[in-house]
Image (tube, rainbow, N blue to C red):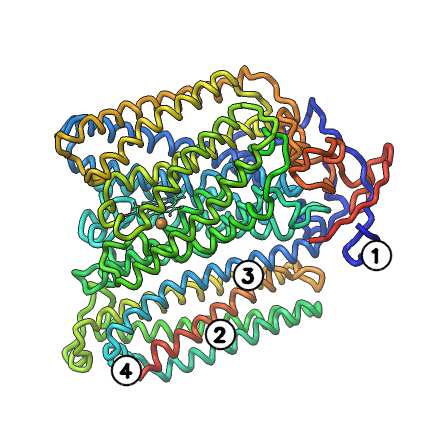
Amino acid sequence: MAAAQSKNMTTLQVKRFKPSENPTNTYLTDEKGVWAWMTTVDHKKIGLMYLVAVAFFFALAGFLAIALRTELWTPAKTFIEADTYNQLFTLHGAMMVFFVLVPSIPAALGNFVLPMQLGAKDVAFPRLNLASFYIYVIGAVFTFISLANNGFDTGWTFYTPYSSDTNSLGVIWVTLGVFILGFSSILTGTNFITTIHKLRAPGITWDKLPLNIWALYATSVIQVLATPVLAITILLLSMENILDIGIFDPAKGGDPVLYQHFFWFYSHPAVYIMIVPGFGIISEVITTFSKKHIFGYWAIALSSLAIAFIGFLVWGHHMFTSGQSAVATTVFSFLTFLVGIPTGIKILNWVATLYKGSIEMKTPMLYVFIFLFLFTIGGFTGIMLGALSVDIHLHDTYYVVAHFHYVMMGGTLMALLAGLHYWWPKMTGKMYNETLGKISAVLIFIGFNMTFLPQFVMGAQGMPRRYYNYIDQFQPFHQTSTIGSYILGAAFLIILYYLVRSLFGGEKASANPWNSRGLEWQATSPPDFHNFDHTPVVINGPYDYHKPMEEFQLGLAVEHNGHGHGEHHEVKTDQTEKA
Amino acid sequence: MANHSASHPAHVQHHFVDSDQQFESAKMGMWVFLVNEILFFGGLFCAYIVFRAWYPELFTQAALELNKLWGGVNTIVLIGSSLTVAMAIRSAQKNQIKGLRINLLITIALACVFMVIKYFEYEHKLHLGIAPGSFWNPTPEILEELSHPKANIFFGIYYMMTGVHGLHVLVGIGLMIWLYIRAGKGHFSSEYYTPVEITGLYWHLVDLIWIFLFPLLYLIE
Ligand code: HEM
Ligand SMILES: [Cu+2]
């Protein structure tokens, strides 16, 4: 760029910082002991703590899923009572959504990599970050207290009057728990937005942001705009139970459809809180393992924001059969179709990125392919559900169950697994076992489709969701589905096994095992307490695979606040914009 | 990077490059949080709009039970406190720590006046049995004025809105006491007064929300 535009240009003295392959001081060795962990404000440790918590809830909710599927082996009672069944599916859904998927990618992986990808030392508000973790824990405690007080069997959506008439003590505790949990999500979002705006390293202009950051940005915007509405909804619902104020419960003069509007005004955007960060991971992994520039950088970056925006206008598609006006349903249906466009844009750009790339089929990449396949099915079936006449038939059937599992498990969870394997060496400094990684990925693919493909079929044939009994005609589908869920369970156990084993006996990871151009890979594995031992300077885009690695390892030769790092000063000039 | 902080001023946290970056970040964080708050109250306003559209006569009837005079006084009190909190920030910018503390004290006092008035308003209503939800048990005279069968819903909304707002006032009072103590310990100067600035932003929002609540609840006819 010409020196004429001097207003935004600064000349920086930079030199190359090659990450050490044998870091002596890492964030894992820096402070030791349980107390140091519990009070840490380091975004990497908080990310790991979230990861463990999320994995715990995933295991718990997954275990419930296996129990549910086992119960459905026969048309009548197999081993648990109908009441228990209702409680289990509610708990499964609520935990998977609120305790696993919503925090999983942003709060666990995002917390770890976001500051590193920005070349920052931490998020903008490290103490709030720690607070968000504890708020999450308190929310979890409330949910467990609810279980000790009759539990709750309202479905994860807490629709009135189910949630205002039955078991109100359990419902009060869990809704307060979800209310509290919301704040942890809000804090993460607020933190990320501020960090992205204010803490970028020299040279990281908006057009050089990794797509993962764009995705987390869009997610944070949704978190900040939608979560408070859930908070007030849930607070009103709790008050409905505690004080009987009568805003949502028809028996008290309220309106249950109003509740549904309030709930879905949050919860449809919330499905994008779950999936959009997954999109970010896909962009990172797909470029790294194709060794190629991303196709359509701006299309992918901006479509995340478009999805965030349109996502706020489609909540009514959950209420086509709830007695909404005909005009409203038509408008919502049309807007729902619109969401398909930015989503489709992303998929096509990813596929185009693969074209003529030198593809390396490592485990993370395998998960990307699984994601592309499953999420596309999930998205298409979503569009079908958005069609009014079709939805009248399919609403509240297993078709909807299959749809959201294809997007949430086939989409978000596969992206999470891709990201987890991709960043595992960076987070832990150890390599996982590639062979076992691939075997379990394939098992997951098989198990997943076995579990959920039959659900499309039986849903279309009229099998209602959330039923404890069913007619004999559906038994083969249910049994296939149950066997599939066992395969899934086994695959997750394998993953748990080799990941934990890698911590103890795993091969040591190099700083950049995948030869990625991403900034987070230019730190040591595992990183230093401050992420980098210099201030990184960025002159290339994050996907410039045609440029040599040296150009991605630059940092300020002289520290901003005075003290230099001595040695050789390789001087370069460069255009940088201060955020 | 171990002794990086050596050249930082004391108030700058380790992960910020300089004081400006920290100030800008804090301010932006607070703005994002305020957006959050607006949506949070937005849900309540939405419930208000829906029920008012359904039962307009209920709202005009029930609003008569609210005391316009004391509501009005409270509005003036809060607007005044917004002024004093702005003056507190001004004092901090000019490095007048004494002025900062005095203005904070006045703001705290005004906020307490607001809460005391609110307490007496609540107290009076509860006394008449105009209580939320299942505690709804108005005296016969009140029932005559409040003949609408859904009158309790109006008050459900009233208590939720003013109650949640009142909680925000209490949080504000807590924050300002904390600022007052820190100012006494000499933590603030014209170089560093970020907490004062962002608490001020918060306080203005709390004030602004009341300015919407007051006419919507008290002044409809
Ligand atoms: C192309 C994008 C999508 C479209 C057009 C779409 C459309 C729909 C529609 C119309 C329904 C309502 C079906 C009914 O209840 O009758 C629905 C349900 C659902 N969708 Fe999607 N969807 C999309 C993507 C997603 C994503 C990405 C997620 C989550 C990651 C998701 C999660 C869900 C969930 C959880 C439900 C069921 C909620 C419940 O009733 O329990 N969807 N979707
Ligand atoms: Cu939706």
The yes-or-no answer for disc 4 within 8 Å of ligand 2 is no
How many residues crowd mark 2 within 10 Å: few (<14), some (14–19), many (20+)? many
Which residue is labeled 2 in the image?
A: B110
Q: Can you give x and y, in whole percent of width and height, for residue B207 in the image?
A: 48, 72
Q: Can you give x and y, in whole percent of width and height, for residue A387 in the image?
A: 31, 51
- In which chain is the residue bearing label 2? B
Q: Can you give x and y, in whole percent of width and height, for residue B82 in the image?
A: 53, 74
Residue at 18% from the left image edge and 52% from the top image edge? A165
- Which one is nearer the viewer's eye here, A392 or B73? A392
Residue type (three-letter) at the residue carrying disc 3: Trp
Marks 3 and 1 sit apart, C-alpha to C-alpha, by 35 Å
Which residue is labeled 3 in the image?
A: B31
Which residue is labeled 4 in the image?
A: B64
Kindly indicate whether the residues beneath marks 3 and 1 are on one polypeptide chain.
Answer: no
Residue A408: mark: none
Query: Horizontally, is A193 left or right of A76 in the view?
Result: right
Residue type (three-letter) at the residue carrying disc 2: Leu
Which residue is labeled 1 in the image?
A: A4
The yes-or-no answer for disc 2 within 8 Å of ligand 2 is no
In contact (CB < 8 Å): disc 4 and disc 1: no
- When the figure is inspected, residue A2 is found, relative to residue B68, above or below; the finding is above
Kindly indicate whether the residues beneath marks 4 and 1 are on one polypeptide chain.
Answer: no
In contact (CB < 8 Å): disc 3 and disc 4: no
Q: Is residue A106 visible?
A: no
